[in-house]
Image (cartoon, rainbow, N blue to C red):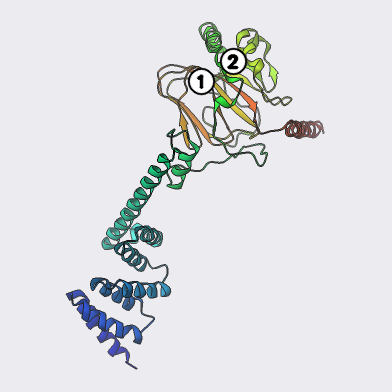
C-alpha cells in the first residue's frame, strides 16, 4: 500500500499534468489515485475535470457523483456537477445543482474573488434557465388560452408565484379568524348582483360628499383615533386628519346627523348585503385620503367580511395594494377585497381621494355561519361587560 509520501507525490504529479493540459495523463494518474485514496474529494474532482476535458462525460459524472457522496454540501462539487449536466445538454437538471451550489456558498464577506466570480456565474445560469423555462411555459399556456388577462388572471398569478415574482399573502386578521375560507385578495365585482345598481348612483353619491367637503370639511375626523386603551404600537396616521372618515354608519349604529345629509347614499346602500353584527358592523363611511399620504401595510380585524370601495374622487397617482396585487381606483368601479390580508393604500396625487367604504358579508358564508359569528361576538361582549362590572 503506498505510503503518505508516495501519495502526495502522485497527487502533485497528477495535478501538474492537469494544470499543464495533459488531460489524458492526468486522468490516468487520478484514476489510479482514486483507488488508493477513495475518500479524497480533491482526487475525484480532479478526475471529473480531466474526464470532461477528454470528452468522457460518463467518467466525469461518475467521479463528481463520488465526490458528492463524500461531501454533498460542498459548493465547488455542486458547481462542477451543474457544469457537467449543462455541458451534457441537460440545463434543467444543471440549474437544480447551480441553485444548490448558491445555497451552499459561504457569506459574501467570506468568499475569495475567484469564488465570487463562480457564485455570480452560477446565479446567471439559474436566472437564464428560469427565464427560458418561464418563457416556454407562458408561451404554451397562452397558446392554450389560459393567460388572457395579464395581472388579473389567477393562472397568471400562479405562474408569477412559481417564479418568485409575487409573494404569497394569507389572511391574518387581528381579532377573529374563521377557518376554511378561500384566500382571495380582490373579488370580481361582476360576481355581485348589487354592484350595477350602486355604481349607477355614483354621481349622486359624489355630489353629496362634495357638498360636505365644501360646507364642512371639518366633519371628517381622523380614521384612526385613540380610544383610551393602552397604545403599545406606533401606528402611523393615528389622530391624523390626512386619513379621515365621515361615518354614515359606525360599528352598526347609524350616525343620524350624517346620514340625514346623504339620503341618496343611504338609499343606494339598501340593496347591499352589509355585514350586520350588533355593535360591531357594518361601518359605512366616506374615506378621505389627503394628497401625498400613504397608509402603511396592515391587516384588518376579521376575515368574515369584505371591504368595498366605491371610488368617488380619484386623482392621478393613487393605488391600493392587497397582498401581491396593486390596483388603481377608477371612479364608479367598485373594488371588493379581503382586508384581513395585508394591504396598503396611497394618494400620490395633488388632490383629495375619496371613496365610499363599507363592509359586506363574505359570499362563502352560510346563514348558519353568520348566526355563529354573531353569537361569538355577542357572547364576547357579554363576558367583557360582566368583567368590567365586576
Relative vertical location of residue 126 with respect to residue 84 in this rendering, above or below: above
Q: Residue 225, located in which quarter of the rendered image?
A: top right
Relative vertical location of residue 177 with respect to residue 283 in this rendering, above or below: below
Relative vertical location of residue 55 with respect to residue 121 in this rendering, above or below: below
Q: Residue at x 35, y 53 (%)?
A: 129
Marks 2/1: CA–CA distance: 11 Å
Residue 30, labelled with which disc? none
Q: Position of residue 157 (x, y in %)?
A: 47, 40
Report the front residue among 375 and 366. 366
Q: Earlier in the sequence, mark 2 or mark 1?
A: 2
> Which residue is label 2 attached to?
197
Could you classify mark 1 by the number of other residues whose Cα lies within 10 Å: few (under 14), some (14-19), or many (20 or more)? some
Mark in front: 2 vs 1? 2
Q: Position of residue 226 (x, y in %)?
A: 61, 27
Q: Residue 125, located in which quarter of the rendered image?
A: bottom left
Q: Is residue 144 left or right of residue 21?
A: right
User: From where the camera sits, is residue 181 visible?
Assistant: yes
Report the front residue among 295 and 179. 179
Q: Position of residue 292 (x, y in %)?
A: 42, 23
Q: Residue furthest left?
A: 20
Report the front residue among 216 and 254. 254
Could you classify mark 2 by the number of other residues whose Cα lies within 10 Å: few (under 14), some (14-19), or many (20 or more)? few
The quarter of the rendered structure image containing the N terminus is bottom left
> Which residue is label 1 attached to?
333
Q: State the SS at label 1.
A: loop
Amino acid at each position: 500500500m503506498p505510503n503518505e509520501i508516495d501519495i502526495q507525490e502522485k497527487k502533485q504529479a497528477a495535478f501538474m499534468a492537469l494544470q499543464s493540459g495533459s488531460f489524458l495523463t492526468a486522468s490516468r494518474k487520478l484514476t489510479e489515485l482514486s483507488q488508493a485514496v477513495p475518500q479524497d474529494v480533491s482526487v475525484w474532482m480532479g478526475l471529473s475535470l480531466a474526464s470532461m476535458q477528454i470528452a468522457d462525460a460518463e467518467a466525469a459524472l461518475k467521479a463528481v457523483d463520488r465526490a458528492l457522496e463524500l461531501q454533498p454540501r460542498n459548493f465547488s462539487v455542486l458547481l462542477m456537477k451543474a457544469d457537467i449536466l449543462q455541458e451534457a445538454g441537460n440545463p434543467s437538471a444543471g440549474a437544480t445543482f447551480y441553485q444548490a451550489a448558491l445555497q451552499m456558498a459561504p457569506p459574501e464577506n467570506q468568499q475569495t474573488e475567484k469564488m465570487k466570480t463562480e457564485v455570480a456565474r452560477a446565479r446567471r445560469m439559474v436566472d437564464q434557465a428560469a427565464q427560458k423555462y418561464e418563457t416556454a411555459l407562458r408561451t404554451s399556456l397562452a397558446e392554450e388560452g389560459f393567460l388572457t388577462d395579464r395581472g388579473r388572471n389567477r393562472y397568471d398569478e400562479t405562474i408569477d408565484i412559481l417564479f418568485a415574482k409575487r409573494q404569497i399573502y394569507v389572511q391574518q386578521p387581528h381579532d377573529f379568524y374563521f377557518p376554511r375560507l378561500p384566500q382571495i385578495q380582490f373579488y370580481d365585482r361582476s360576481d355581485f348582483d348589487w354592484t350595477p345598481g350602486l355604481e349607477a348612483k355614483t354621481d349622486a353619491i359624489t355630489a353629496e360628499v362634495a357638498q360636505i367637503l365644501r360646507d364642512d370639511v371639518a366633519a371628517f375626523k381622523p380614521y384612526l383615533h385613540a380610544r383610551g386603551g393602552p397604545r403599545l404600537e406606533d401606528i402611523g396616521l393615528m389622530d391624523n386628519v390626512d386619513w379621515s372618515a365621515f361615518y354614515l354608519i359606525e360599528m352598526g349604529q347609524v350616525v343620524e346627523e350624517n346620514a340625514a345629509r346623504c339620503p341618496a347614499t343611504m338609499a343606494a346602500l339598501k340593496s347591499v348585503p352589509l355585514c350586520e353584527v350588533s355593535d360591531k358592523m357594518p361601518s359605512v363611511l366616506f374615506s378621505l385620503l389627503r394628497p401625498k399620504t400613504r397608509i402603511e401595510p396592515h391587516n384588518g380585524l376579521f376575515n368574515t367580511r369584505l371591504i368595498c370601495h366605491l371610488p368617488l374622487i380619484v386623482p392621478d397617482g393613487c393605488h391600493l395594494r392587497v397582498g401581491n396585487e396593486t390596483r388603481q381606483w377608477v371612479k364608479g368601479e367598485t373594488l371588493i377585497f379581503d382586508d384581513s390580508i395585508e394591504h396598503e393604500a396611497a394618494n400620490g396625487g395633488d388632490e383629495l381621494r375619496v371613496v365610499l367604504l363599507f363592509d359586506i358579508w363574505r359570499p362563502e358564508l352560510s346563514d348558519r355561519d353568520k348566526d355563529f359569528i354573531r353569537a361569538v361576538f355577542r357572547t364576547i361582549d357579554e363576558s367583557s361587560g360582566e368583567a368590567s362590572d365586576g
